[in-house]
Amino acid sequence: KNQVEQSPQSLIILEGKNCTLQCNYTVSPFSNLRWYKQDTGRGPVSLTIMTFSENTKSNGRYTATLDADTKQSSLHITASQLSDSASYICVVTLLNDYKLSFGAGTTVTVRA
Amino acid sequence: DGGITQSPKYLFRKEGQNVTLSCEQNLNHDAMYWYRQDPGQGLRLIYYSQIVNDFQKGDIAEGYSVSREKKESFPLTVTSAQKNPTAFYLCASSIGGRRYNEQFFGPGTRLTVL
């Protein structure tokens, strides 16, 4: 069973609207959590990284939040653009291991 | 222009054939990784290398082999023993194997078995 669960699996939004993606994880002990953006047929690119002591991190129109107590993270996209159409992947790093635990991703489609 | 390159972008293989996927990086990173991506699943680690001439199996190493003769290169061979090789393969690198070091990904190779 995947220890990093993302929801929804996919969503469609109109250009200019906001959306929020969810990530719940069970892996521990926790070191940090990253959100990656992956365009179709391309490699993932890091958007944000948060350690257990950080609650929020922004990168332009992308804002990630983290609640280490409930093991939940969210990625909020503000004023979506067509270029935001991609898969967004939540990745958790364990404290005592360099290996990463990947969520299956949320596919976002932005329509004009 | 620094980064990670993978070749080819698309690869077609007949059943029973071995194929090698190329991964090169000029970021001077010590650690390199190979992942497999299937629809609806998270990336899964095939092999990783933290230093030249050394590598370890990941979670799904069966049917794959690697070498790390140079710091810049980490080729992956998909052997005929891999029963379901059709997938998107991603190579990544990081400064070191430490947990908080960001992994930078290449553009990927899509392998299709005919």
Image (cartoon, rainbow, N blue to C red):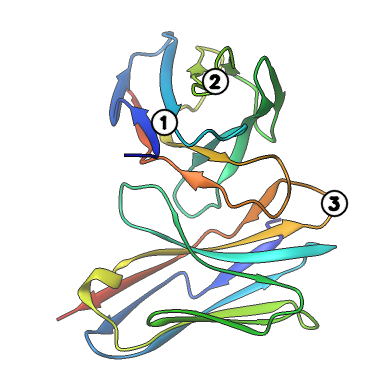
Residue B32 horizontal/vertical position (percent): 58, 33
* Residue at the top extreme of this rendering: B17
Q: Any mark on residue B86, and which?
A: 1
Above or below residue A17? Residue A3 is above
Question: Mark 3 touching mark 1, by CB under 8 A?
Answer: no
Q: In the structure shown, which secondary structural element does the residue marked by tag 1 occupy?
A: loop
Observer-side mark, 3 or 1, equals: 3
User: Gap in Å between the C-alphas at discs 2 and 3?
Assistant: 31 Å
* Residue at the left extreme of this rendering: A112
- Nearest to the observer: residue A97 or residue A53: A53
Q: Residues within 10 Å of mark 1 (few under 14, many from 20)?
A: some
Amino acid type, label 1: Thr
Q: Any mark on residue A96, and which?
A: 3
Amino acid type, label 3: Asn
Q: How crowded is mark 2: few (under 14 residues within 10 Å), some or many (20 or more)?
A: some
User: Gap in Å between the C-alphas at discs 1 and 2?
Assistant: 10 Å
Observer-side mark, 2 or 3, equals: 3
Q: In the structure shown, which secondary structural element does the residue marked by tag 2 occupy?
A: loop
Q: In the visual, does B31 lie left or right of A97? A: left
